[in-house]
Amino acid sequence: MEVLRLLDMLEDLIEESSSIPFAQKAMVDREEVLELVKEIRLQMPDEVKQAKWIKEERQRILAEAQEDAENIIEEANKHISSLVDENEVAKMAKQRGEEIVQQAQESAKEMRLGARDYADDLLEGVEENLVDLLRTLQKNRRELKGMDE
């Protein structure tokens, strides 16, 4: 770019110029500086047009890329949604299956505990009957022994 070359020349001119002692000032050739500024102004319109075109083209490309990205995201969301729907059915079926298994396990546990309690109650009744029967037998034996005497 011509403008950048001219600005470099202006910068070199200022850096190579004589400095004023004890001040941050430099002595430059006025005609030379003005000539460079004039050249920069002459070159500026073309380069400004190019920069404007580049900026507009960049904006167009960015807008296009944004639109493409949005379309890709929309398609991906549709695809994900369909997969999620299929996955949801599978998850619900699995969850329902797990619930059924859990209910069956709980029912089996309750039946085992109920059967154990029922058997224990029956055995307790039999034990009481046997105790009563044993007492009766012991009483009868004592009575029989008492008759011998």
Image (spheres, rainbow, N blue to C red):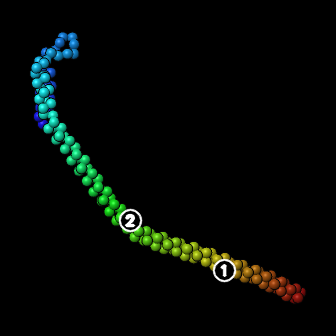
Disc 1 secondary structure class: helix
Q: In 3D space, how far apart are the residues under numbered discs 1 and 2 (Cα atoms)?
A: 56 Å
- Residue 105 shows in the view: no
Disc 2 secondary structure class: helix
Extreme residue in the top direction = 21
Quadrant of res 139: bottom right
Residue placed most toward the observer, 114 or 48: 48
**At 72% across and 82% down in the image, what residue appears?**
126
**Left/right of residue 28 with respect to residue 77 in the rendered view:** left
Quadrant of res 120: bottom right
Residue placed most toward the observer, 96 or 65: 65
As shown in the figure, which amino acid type bears the numbered disc 2?
A: Ser
Judge whether 131 appears above or below 24 on screen: below
- Coordinates of residue 31 in the picture (x, y in percent): 10, 20
Say the numbered circle drawn on residue 81: 2
Say the numbered circle drawn on residue 119: 1
- Coordinates of residue 116 in the picture (x, y in percent): 64, 77
